[in-house]
Image (cartoon, rainbow, N blue to C red):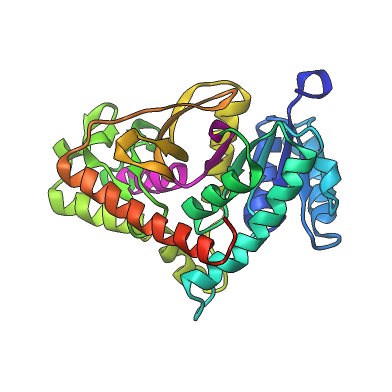
Amino acid sequence: MHTQGVPKIACIGAGNVGATAAQYCLEMGLGNVVLVDIVEGLPQGKALDMTEAGPIRNYSVTCTGTNDYADIAGADLVIVTAGLPRKPGMTRLDLLEKNGRIISGICGQIKQHAPDAIVIIVTNPLDVMVYLAYKTLGFPNNRVLGMAGCLDSARMRAFVAMELSVSMTNVDTMVLGSHGDAMVPLPQYTTVSGIPITQLMAQERIAAIIARTRDGGGEIVRLLKTGSAFYAPAAGAVRMAQSILRDERQVLPCAAYLNGEYGLNDIYMGVPCLLGRSGVENVVELKLTEQETAALHHSACEVQEGMEGLRQLGLI
């Protein structure tokens, strides 16, 4: 850790998600933040703006903006949000290639300047990008993970709370699998103060909430028309960062490397993870029904297609 034990956090990508993640890190006092982007002036301007908010929002950690990756030297944790959103007419393979090349380049810089960091990837297509980061960085798999399950679970928590008119803080959910249409929400592990939602609402309402959770990002894109979600995705990444930097040992759903867990090998997928100082300290294996296991393996097939795409492009 850095200055008098204050962690150093690098947020790579100063767009909406990256800048919001930086802001949350500052407001929570998680550490000093370096905001990196290739656009000149963008990270510097946003960092200065956040610094000027400090006296009012009452934080004393610092925020620096830069276009130079050398400034991430010694970072304890790196959050990567850089990349392009999928645009109309763009195939998944197009997005895979464009973001794949961006992530490869960024990971080369992280490997050079912050070789001891824990790296959280937020860029889509998420599970495939984390696998690419893992291969490019060459770090132990516990130090490379992806943010998706925290976001998908938060969306489901919000929808359950809205449906039942209860406090969101009383709702716990678990969403596994890939970050996309094949995600696997688990109603049996979704509770309100410990009471399974299967006892609190009709099956068709649960089905509607699962469908809305799967379409969570799409719903926001349709409403915004010229952009995508950023408050909740940034919050998900920072929630993971908090558990790691403060060694809270929270069990959170994240894209983690699987080596036999859930019957899957050499793949990154959304599963419950114990997050502490060394990153992913343990993958928690839940008891799943045959149907849920089948859904998880179907989700894995989608990720493997993306990995095959990366191989075709020569990125892994």
- Residue 164, percent from left and from top: 26, 43
Query: Is there any visible trace of residue 311 in the rendered image?
Result: yes
Say if the magenta span includes residue 149. Answer: yes
Asked which quadrant contains residue 139, the reply is top right
Query: Residue 12, can we see it?
Result: no
Q: Going 71% across and 52% down the picture, which residue do you hit?
A: 106
Report the quarter where the C terminus lies.
bottom right
On screen, residue 248 above or below 18 = above
Q: Residue furthest bottom?
A: 89
Magenta includes 258? no
Relative height, residue 251 to residue 173 (above, below): above
Q: Position of residue 253 (x, y in %)?
A: 42, 37
**Residue 87 falls left or right of residue 56:** left
Q: Residue at x 47, y 51 (%)?
A: 127
**Range shown magenta:** 141-161
Residue 28 position in % (x across, y down):
65, 32
Q: Is residue 52 above or below residue 104?
A: above
- Is 199 in front, or is 258? 258
Q: Is residue 284 above or below residue 159?
A: above
Q: Quadrant of the rendered structure where residue 292 is?
A: top left
Where the N terminus falls, by quadrant?
top right
Q: Nearer the viewer, residue 290 or 31?
A: 290
For the stretch drawn in magenta, the main secondary structure is helix
